[in-house]
Amino acid sequence: MLLLLIIIRIINSMIIITVIIIIIIIIIIIIIIIIIIIIIIIIIIIIIIIIIIIVIIIIRIINTMTIIIIIIIIIIIIIIIINVMSIVNKYANYARRHSKTRRFLPVKLSGPGPPRFASRETFYAKRDGQQTEDGTAKHGGHSGAEQVRAHVLFVRVVRVLGRRLEFQRDRP
């Protein structure tokens, strides 16, 4: 009888011990799970913060880049407009000086003696100091001031030299 009681006591105590061990193990597992969940939440929060920071930086960069790109585009447009205007002006001047209707209209040269004529192209070439060796007009332009100076000089030369200036080959 006493032996049976002792066995029952031992079994009871073992059951209690195992129950306590199981409870401790469950608590440890719960604590580990909670810690893992907290770590995962912290990692997710850090990732979200990093993504937000990256997005803000990208938005800032895009804003500054768009401003820079807009400024560059405006500068390019201004440069293109200036170039186009200068080209148009150059061609307008060239057309004004070398248009076919005007080029073949003879220019009456001032000076004493009978009226003498030169083709407009040669006139402009002589006026601008742009005559080639064989007397034909050479294309290309000078600045306005140079043209005016050359024109004044040309008129003086024609007045002084008069008939001696050789324009025979340019007669119509």
Image (tube, helix red, strand yellow):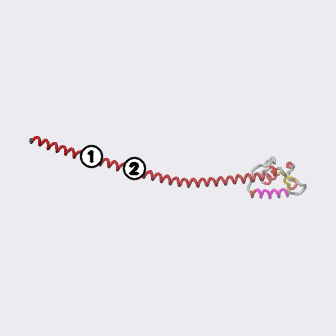
Let me know if residue 25 is in the magenta part: no
**Residue 37, labelled with which disc?**
none
Say what amino acid the circle numbered 1 marks: Ile
Residue occupying the far front of the picture: 1
Identified at 86% across, 48% down, the residue is: 169
Comparing 63 with 2, the one in front is: 2
- Residue 6, given in percent of the width and then of the height, sits at 12, 42
Cα distance in 3D space between marks 2 and 1: 27 Å
Comparing 43 with 172, the one in front is: 43
Instruction: Characterize the local packing of mark 2: few (<14), some (14-19) or many (20 or more) Cα atoms within 10 angstroms.
Output: few
Magenta-highlighted stretch: main secondary structure? helix
Identified at 73% across, 51% down, the residue is: 91
Identified at 84% across, 51% down, the residue is: 105
Whether residues under marks 2 and 1 lie with C-beta atoms below 8 angstroms apart, the answer is no
- Residue 12, given in percent of the width and then of the height, sits at 16, 44
Q: Which of marks 2 and 1 is nearer the N terminus?
A: 1
Classify mark 1: helix, strand or loop: helix
| Magenta-colored span | 147-159
Say what amino acid the circle numbered 2 marks: Ile
Placement of the N terminus among the 4 image quadrants:
top left
Classify mark 2: helix, strand or loop: helix
Task: State which quadrant residue 159 falls in.
Answer: bottom right
Instruction: Characterize the local packing of mark 1: few (<14), some (14-19) or many (20 or more) Cα atoms within 10 angstroms.
Output: few
**Residue 26, labelled with which disc?**
1
The residue that label 2 is drawn on is: 44
Residue occupying the far left of the picture: 1
Mark 2 vs mark 1: give the one in front.
1
Let me know if residue 151 is in the magenta part: yes
Comparing 78 with 19, the one in front is: 19
